[in-house]
Amino acid sequence: MDLSVATSLAEQLGNERQQLCSPVAARMLRAFPELNRSLRLEESYSPTNRLSEMAVERLNELVRSVLLFEAPSLAEHELRWAYGVLPPHGVTFEHQSTMVRWYFEEVRKLQLSSEEHTLTYELERFLLSCVRQVYRRN
């Protein structure tokens, strides 16, 4: 991973966090209304805002961390942890893998260099592979 490309992409992901995460959360709730049951809503949150904060923004920060620290193992550890916590609340492989795919669809709508664009595909494949391994292993 080219550190300058990774750093530039991580910076964009940080700057565009809301633009990336809110549409993914809204799309997830439309496609998977059952996720509403697994959200612990507080009065000040809409379901979209809560899902964005609890899941998609967390994914955004995970991707940024992998890029900034050049540490793919962070993703593996996070996804293993999530597998231990989320399925009892109704979060499935389909939910996780769809969120990853739709998140990267949003990322690729940003103004990216060709190197950043390539890196997004590599990261998406890697994260989807991690999700598959975690759910297959357990």
Image: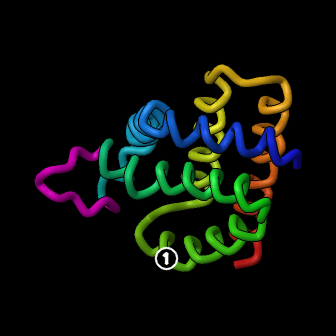
Q: Position of residue 63 (x, y in %)?
A: 65, 52
- Mostly what secondary structure, the magenta segment? loop
Quarter of the image with the C terminus is bottom right
Q: What residue type is labelled 1?
A: Val
**Mark 1 crowd level (few <14, some 14–19, many ≥20, 10 Å Cα):** few
Q: In this view, does 138 lie to the left or right of 83?
A: right
Q: How many discs appear?
A: 1
Instruction: Tell whether 127 sits left or right of 99.
Output: right
In the image, residue 5 above or below residue 79: above
Q: In this view, does 9 lie to the left or right of 15?
A: right
Q: Per the image, is 105 magenta? A: no
Query: Looking at this rendering, what residue extends furthest in the left direction?
Result: 43
Q: Where does the image place residue 79, in percent across and percent down from the top left? A: 64, 68
Closest to the observer, 6 or 38: 6
For the residue pair 62 and 69, the one nearer the viewer reads as 69
- Rendering coords of residue 81 (x, y %): 58, 77
Can you tell which quarter of the image residue 110 is in? top right
What is the residue that sits farthest to the right in this orientation?
Answer: 1
The residue tagged 1 is 85
Q: In this view, does 41 lie above or below 17?
A: below
Give me the residue at 36% from left, 45% from top: 33
Q: Is residue 95 above or below residue 12?
A: below
Q: Nearer the viewer, residue 125 or 73?
A: 73
Which region shows up in magenta? 38-47
Residue sitting at x 42%, y 36%: 18
Q: At which x and y percent is residue 87?
A: 50, 70
